[in-house]
Amino acid sequence: MLNSEIKIAVIGLGYVGLPLARLFATKYPVVGFDINENRINKLKQGNDETLEVDSETLKSVLVNNIDTLNLDSENQKYSRGLFLTRNVEEIRPCNFYVITVPTPVDRNNQPDLKPLINASEIAGKVISKGNIVVYESTVYPGATEEDCIPVVERVSGLKFNLDFFAGYSPERINPGDKEHTVETIKKVTSGSTPEVAEIVDSVYHSVITAGTHKASSIKVAEAAKVIENSQRDINIAFVNELAKIFNLIKIDTQEVLEAAGTKWNFLHFKPGLVGGHCIGVDPYYLAQKAQEVGYHPEIILAGRRVNDGMGKYIAGEVIKQMINNDLTIKNAHVLLLGITFKENCPDIRNTKAIDIYNELKSYGLQIDIYDPWANPIDIFREYGLSILSEYPENNGYAAIVLAVSHNKFKDINLLYHKQMGCVIYDVKGMLDLTTVSKRL
Ligand SMILES: NC(=O)c1ccc[n+]([C@@H]2O[C@H](COP(=O)([O-])OP(=O)(O)OC[C@H]3O[C@@H](n4cnc5c(N)ncnc54)[C@H](O)[C@@H]3O)[C@@H](O)[C@H]2O)c1
């Protein structure tokens, strides 16, 4: 298949799928499909609630009518652009299917492949001979060929690597990061045959300015992605453990890290909460696969345990500081600054700031949450909590916990509160030392 013959369908238009569909649409005809009608309707108006693609950029590729893409043209006179739909039939004319649906874990931290299986069924319903299905969702090595492709085969009735082919190209974007965007991050590609790997690589290479790295197999590409995030998780767990040790020794972790960081090969990681649906989730995928093949992962799961316990630990530290300041704990009024899973981003899924909230609540504290990035409706739907819409200027808080380092928090004058006897706990090491009572 030549690049000029490529007609792309992107299945799942979230943090990963939308920026990718937008980028592909600058060179190819693209049909973006999502099962969430509300998301499709908002995107059609140029409104991306994840804030990854701004309205002007999105509108510059959007087409209102699928016919303008000329997908049925026999002489490949297709038009570039992005048509959005939740009608499966409208992705049928495509020949290059990219699947970017979520890969969460269930309540027992086991991989939940339901969205991926469902998207594979959708692809199976519409693909025809010669088509390529590329997976981008983060999985364990083997998931594409062992779990997903059999579903595509079953539903389509087509034979893998004879009638249709597959690829895997993991996404590396970092939500909220305007510097490392989809086109400026080198992309790993792979395919189910050497020829297909070449086609997949060439399609991505045509839009990714940072270039591509063609892995030797789909499994290698899958493993590469899942270890990137596992490596970060383990390194953060290590500094979180250091933070607990240094806290007992009564030295400041940030100062230790700053001093150690002057060595050329010291790795720069900071302690903190590990939430979201990547770093805190992907290691469980790797761990599950390891166990399936008879290896019990020690370090990967230890890292997860340490990081998952940080919310509770931080809350305990805040309580100790309050006791030190002779503050009454029961019904004390506390402000939690930040509830999203990371800074400068509206994503609240699997946020660990909620662990701080829950633990403080269990001590009988009254907690206000302020987060200028979080959508109050999403917070209520997901966690049943109401959050303040404005920074509460004049409330006399017993403690303020900065949980997320949104840039907007830099402008808040917390020194005033500290002078009034309030405990200021800085999880992110963002505030000036004179302002804080304690930091992680
Ligand atoms: N968000 C990130 O920072 C990031 C970075 C790298 C990789 N990833 C990986 O990319 C994948 C997608 O993550 P995301 O953050 O974009 O998820 P997301 O939740 O933002 O978006 C997923 C979209 O897929 C849609 N969807 C779900 N099931 C579907 C189906 N069967 N058919 C069509 N649409 C469907 C949802 O409605 C949603 O709009 C995951 O595997 C994730 O681990 C995410």
Image: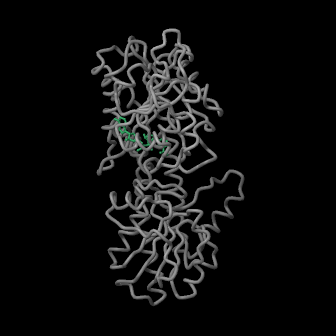
Q: Is residue 432 above or below residue 309?
A: below
- Residue drawn at (37%, 59%) of the image: 377
Q: Where residue 310 sits: x, y (%)?
A: 44, 64
Q: Nearer the viewer, residue 256 or 76?
A: 76
Extreme residue in the top direction: 75
Where residue 178 sits: x, y (%)? 61, 48
Residue 260 percent across, percent down from the top left: 67, 61
Name the residue nearer the viewer: 349 or 228: 349
Residue 149 appears left or right of 183: left
Colour mode?
one colour
Instruction: Identify the residue at horizontal 57%, vertical 33% (top origin).
Output: 187
**Image point 46% across, 53% down: which residue?**
347
Q: Is residue 262 left or right of residue 346?
A: right
Work out whether 347 lies above or below 410: above
Measured as percent of width and height from the top left, residue 173 is found at 54, 42
- The image shows residue 163, relative to residue 106, as above or below, that is above
Please state the total of marks drawn on the protein image: 0
Q: Nearer the viewer, residue 262 or 17?
A: 17
Displayed-image quarter of ligand 1: top left
Q: Is residue 311 above or below residue 365?
A: above
The residue sitting at the bottom extreme is 326
Q: Kindly identify the residue that appears in the image at 63 percent across and 66 percent down.
A: 256
